Amino acid sequence: MDLAQLLLREPVMWAIWLLLFVLAVPGLVVLASPEGVRRPRQALREAAEALRGYRDHRRQRRQQALDTVRYAQELAAAAEHAAATAQRWRDRWHHSRVRLDEAWQAWQDAEGRRDRSRAAAAFAAPETDLTPEGYAERERALARQVLAAARHGHLPIATVADALAGRDGWDPRLHPADQELHVHRAIAAHLAHRYRQAATAERLTWHDTQLAAATRDSLRAEAGAAATRAAGLRHLVPGAPTRQSAMARPGRQWAVRSELSA
């Protein structure tokens, strides 16, 4: 059995040889220098200081490497969080876009009903004397129309009270055709206002969505650069956990707004 096989099979022998080698290093340093032979104590002190400086340097490098790895992991986590936030904002913008389209269509439908009511009112039959019973029926018909519109969200609920009280231009005595035109005008005006509100909300949500996407892309770039730096130093901290983040990898850039809204 040769020496190499003996050391591999006997860990105790390997430890003893390693200890003897470490103890012999100072002597070798002293003997290697003529100045060390003349002044062995000073040579040993200088060798010890050099060894201590080397250990301190390795400790500092190891700490710097550990800080770099931890920073890369924190950036990767931040990039993942930013990606999730950007996705939530995109979903919110998508919902606001759907509401905007619905508000637009509701407004256009109301405009069409108003135009048809205007044409019908222009050709309405002349009115005869209105009896109390006829007046009461018109009041009930107006209340039914306004209440139905409010239930569908086409008019504010406060409009019902105004119509029943004859306030804000509501008049139960109007001809049924004129009354229907008045109701459809009010509905069209209200839905136009609701569409403008939806358009404002969609613009604000789109702006926040773009900001969230820019933050996500910036963090992804920083996390990728930090991961590259950490990979070059990870051998100095073999015990550090490895974090592989899909969010740290560069992704597709945000599409333009027209593509998202398609």
Image (spheres, grey):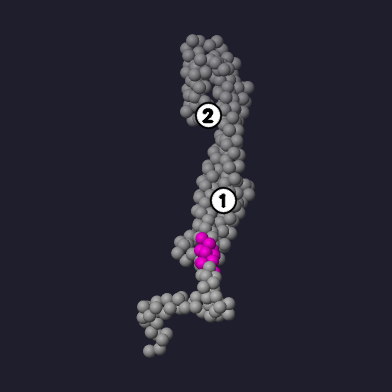
Tell me how far mark 1 sits from mark 2, CA to CA.
Answer: 40 Å
Q: Are dots 1 and 2 in contact, CB under 8 Å?
A: no
Image coordinates for residue 8, horizontal then vertical, percent? 39, 81
Q: Is residue 103 left or right of residue 17?
A: right
Q: Which mark is residue 154?
A: 2
Type of amino acid under label 1: Arg
- Which residue is at 36% across, 78% downward? 12
| Image spot of residue 232 (x, y percent) | 55, 66
Q: Is residue 190 left or right of residue 15?
A: right
At a point 60% along the width and 46% down the height, the residue shown is 210
Sequence-first tag of 1 and 2: 2
Q: Is residue 103 above or below residue 122?
A: below
Q: Is residue 247 visible?
A: no
Q: Is residue 54 magenta?
A: yes
Total labels: the figure holds: 2
Q: Residues within 10 Å of mark 1 (few under 14, many from 20)?
A: many
Towards the viewer: 108 or 141: 108
- Could you say where residue 118 lies in the image, as x and y percent from the top left? 61, 25
Q: Which residue is more in the foreground, 260 or 125?
A: 260
Give the class, few, some or many, for how many residues have Cα within 10 Å of label 2's Cα (few <14, many ≥20).
Answer: many
Residue ID for mark 1: 216
- Give the magenta-colored segment's residue range: 50-63
Name the residue at 49% across, 26% down: 150
Quick check: 151 above or below 23? above
**From the image, which quarter does the N terminus lie in?**
bottom left
30 or 80, which lies in front? 30
**From what the image shows, is residue 46 above or below residue 153?**
below
Residue 159 pos. (x, y %)? 52, 22
